[in-house]
Each structure stands twice: as C-alpha cells, then as structure tokens.
Image: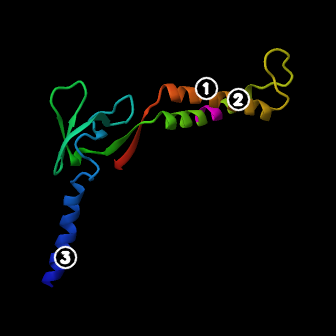
C-alpha cells in the first residue's frame, strides 16, 4: 500500500517539475522568440500575447534570461509565463527564395488566369486561361525568387507550444 502511495505521489509531482524546465536546446547564445501573456487585447497579432525576440543570456531552473536588443540589462521570464517559444534556424536566402517563388507562382497563375480575355485586342492575351496561368506562374515564380533572394527572412522552429 505504501509503495502505491509513493508511486502516485511520484507520478503527480514529477511532471510539474519537468514542465517548469526549458528544453535542452535553449542554451546561452541561442536566438529565441517568446510569447508571454498580455493583459489586454492588442490590435496586432498575436492577440493577448506579447512577442519578444532576443538572445538567451542564461537558463536557471524555471527562469529564462534574455538579452533584448535596444534594452539595458536582461529580461527575466518565468517558465510558467511562456505560452510559446521558438528557436531561430537562421536566415536562409535559398529557403526564402524557394518559398517566395512558390507563393509568387501560385499568385501569378491565379492573377493571369483570371485577367485573361482571349477576345482582347490590345495587351497580352492568350487563347486559353491555362496558357495565361502558365505564363503568370513563370513570371510570379521568377519575381518571387528574386524577392526571396534579395530580402531573406529569419526562419524559426517551435520548441514550446
């Protein structure tokens, strides 16, 4: 009977301690973005959450200390306040180029397909909407690839949901 009580207490207490810790990949020097609660609803996203980006200074038990650009000192965030935490995967011009090219191709195909009028006499016109969509996909993909290559963005991986 005693062993059953000990096991039940063990099963109830251990998950609380484990949940109060940060994942092993959160190490000093890692760039992260953290969502913490906001008391009032904000106009911009995320709703009722504040988004903070910074570099991990230290991780002590259930406390995350961040160096936030443009501030003096560090910001201490308790683990219980973290609603979501992402780790930076860095800036990748190649990945940005591929993602923006795919989005541009889809957008260009839709736009050219909808705007095509085979009976138009001036400007570009194609015999079929599918041909117009193909040309639009090529233009949109090319423009999207150039934009993604020139202005790449930071990529993130979620570690706390």
Q: Residue at x 19, y 76 (%)?
A: 7
The magenta span reads: 103-107
Above or below 10: residue 24: above
Task: Identify the disc placed on residue 7.
Answer: 3
10 Å crowding of disc 2: few (<14), some (14-19), many (20+): many
Under circle 1, the secondary element is helix
Task: Single out the mark in the foreground, 2 or 3.
Answer: 2
Nearest to the observer: residue 99 or residue 41? 99
User: Which residue is the extreme one toward the left?
Assistant: 2
User: Residue 77 location in percent, x, y?
Assistant: 20, 41
**Location of residue 51 in the rendering, given as x and y in whole percent from the top left corner:** 32, 35
Pair 2/1: label in front: 1
Alpha carbon of mark 2 to alpha carbon of mark 3: how far? 65 Å
Q: Is residue 161 visible?
A: no
Q: Is residue 120 left or right of residue 49?
A: right
Q: Which mark is residue 136?
A: 2
In the rendered picture of this protein, how many numbered marks are placed on residues?
3
Measuring 20% from the left and 65% from the top, which residue is drawn there?
Answer: 14
């Amino acid at each position: 009977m005693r062993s059953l009580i000990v096991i039940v207490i063990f099963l109830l207490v251990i998950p609380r301690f484990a949940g109060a810790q940060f994942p092993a990949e959160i190490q000093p020097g890692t760039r992260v973005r953290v969502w913490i609660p906001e008391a009032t609803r904000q106009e911009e996203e995320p709703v009722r959450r504040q988004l903070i980006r910074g570099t991990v200074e230290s991780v002590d038990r259930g406390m995350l200390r961040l160096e936030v650009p443009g501030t003096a000192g560090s910001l201490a965030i308790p683990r219980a306040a973290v609603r979501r935490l992402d780790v930076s995967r860095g800036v990748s011009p190649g990945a940005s180029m591929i993602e923006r090219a795919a989005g541009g191709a889809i957008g260009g195909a839709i736009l050219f397909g909808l705007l095509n009028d085979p009976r138009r006499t001036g400007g570009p016109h194609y015999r079929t909407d599918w041909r117009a969509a193909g040309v639009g996909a090529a233009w949109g993909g090319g423009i999207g690839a150039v934009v993604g290559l020139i202005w790449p963005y930071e990529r993130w991986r979620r570690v706390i949901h």
